[in-house]
Amino acid sequence: MSTLSEPRRPRLLPQNRKLRHLKGLSLRNLSFAPVQLRTSDDVALIRSPNKLGALKEAGQLHGSRSSDNLRHDSRPERSRSQPPRRTSLSTVSTSPAQRQKRLKQLLDDTLGDVFFSLHVGGIDEPVYVSEVRERSANFNFQFFDLASQAADVSRSCRIVIRVWARRLKQTTWTFLLEELVDLRDLNFIGTLLDRQYPPNALLFHLDDGVYSFDFPTRESAPRNAPPVATSSYNALMKLANLESSIEDAMQTQQRIMEQINEILNSSTTDAPDVAEQEVALAQKYVAMQRRTNRLTQARRDELQESLRKRSAAIATGRELQEKVEEDIRNNRETLVAAKQLLEETQQQIRGQRRRICSELADIFPITPIPNAPPLSFQICDVPLPNSIYDAATARTLNEDILSAGLGLVALLTKHLQLYLSHALPYPLYHHGSRSYAKDDISLLSDKSGSRREFPLYLPRGGSTALQWRFEYAWFLLNKDIEALCASQGLKVVDIRQTLPNLKYLLYVCSAGTEEVPARKKGGVRGLWAGRLKGRLSAVPSLMDGESSSAAGSRRGSSDSDLTGQHADALRNAIAKSNNAHGNGHDLGLPFASSDVKFTLRTKGLRENIAG
């Protein structure tokens, strides 16, 4: 639809306008004034509320007139009732409610619902029925396409337009308007703007613009444009003849096909030919069924073989299951004995851990400091404050004492990881008061390995960087103690309390009501004493000295290493014994050689020998 206000020229000549060029229809200034053209068949439409039902019930989609009448009838005159001039003085004395009511009644009388249908001469049914447009006085219907219709419709230049309307708050349709339109007589107006439309004015939307009967043609002057080469009249005529020939050929083809179908339907088939065809069809079905039978038999054989293999597998599985059940029955007693042994072993391990932790608590006594604030403890009479080394602590505590205390804590923590079977996240290296901790986990900027070792002693000279490394080493020691507590299910309140947390761990690990198992007798010391009793009767002084040394050793010394002094004394005693027996014969001790190092923790030398 064009909306240009300036006049322009149409692209279609009047004699070339066909129904295929019509794209849409518009209605302006709806008026319910009575129309002059009305047929007797329109009464049924007035009684019916449904538009399609009314069209079919009326049976006058093409009207009571024949196609010849439509071709010769001229365009009927429409009744144009001129409404009287209205004045606003009559509404001065009325109330607003009455004016609103009058305005609403006027609106109901003016607005309505409308739909239309298009009819072509020679065709009973309408070629197009529009949708229903509701509650308006100016209607723009949806566009449509009639180019795909038959040739007698798309090439027609005459059309009958019938319009039905319905007032608001009514259910019946009223025949409003009927127009016999010749598209060649339409006037080109180009646009819908700036127009004073008469009542029930019809506007036609073609491919090149808007047309109407009610306004003169508005065309712009031709422009001076260079000539454009177009088809000649002879070429156009050839195209028209060719199109007519094609249409005739299609009609002839359709007519011949209908004749052939009639001949085939009327002719009879020879009986022998039908019998031969039936026999061939039956043989085809038989061959198809035989092929299906062969496939089914092959599938049956595959399923039988699969069932046989599954039966064999099930039998083998049952035999294996019976064998396993028999093994389970035979090993049930062994399982019970193994569970009992495992439980006893766990009890022994728990008891040994209690004993070891109790002995460690005796070896490294952690006691409160007299006349000191709460949670102030000392280990082996060496006071060790919590992880806060400030000026007050430095004045009251010597640096060597602090380093010695941290070394004892590091030694105790390092041994506890072995007895509790829980590795420390930060390894500790005990060297007395020069112990240190190593951090292999954290992401440090310095990649040097020595920078990951943090001393557990105060630096000399008051260096700030070394002071930070000492405090970080103390933090790593506290984290190791926290990890040991967590392995035993203990929750540490404050990791900075080094000795209280360690004493709490030893107290919990050594607690229990059952009897603590006794220390196992033997080891390297017992093996050595037993063999010397049988083969070194000539050296009683050595045995007396060793017995006194064994009696004077503290509890738990059988699990510690021999010192260098004891090793030298043992080698001298063995040498004297060899000289006393003459010819320097060896006594057969595994550690008689001077270049062999041995410890009481040597694997394979622990035996239970009654002392």
Image: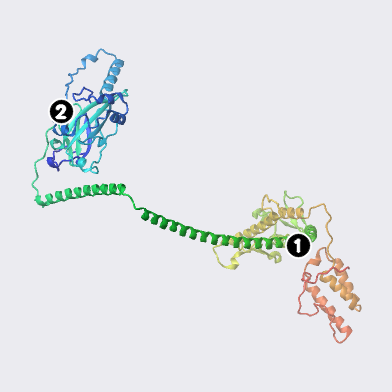
Q: Residue 211, which numbered label?
A: none
- The mark that comes first in sequence, 1 or 2, is 2
Residue situated furthest bottom in the rendering: 583
Residue 96 to residue 481: above or below: above
In the shown orientation, is residue 443 left or right of residue 563? left
Q: Nearer the viewer, residue 18 or 471?
A: 18
Disc 1: CA contacts within 10 A as few (<14), some (14-19) or many (>=20): few
The residue drawn where x is 24% and y is 15% is 91
Report whether residue 160 is seen. yes
Q: Image quadrant for the C terminus?
A: bottom right
Q: Residue 75, position in %: x, y?
A: 14, 30
In the shown orientation, is residue 13 left or right of residue 400? left
Q: Residue 601, position in %: x, y?
A: 77, 69
Q: Residue 575, position in %: x, y?
A: 84, 81
Q: Kindly identify the amino acid type of the residue bearing the numbered disc 1.
A: Asp
Q: Quickly name the residue at label 2.
A: 76
The residue drawn where x is 20% and y is 37% is 205
Residue situated furthest top in the rendering: 93
Query: Which image quadrant is residue 416 in?
Result: bottom right
Q: Residue 327, which numbered label?
A: 1
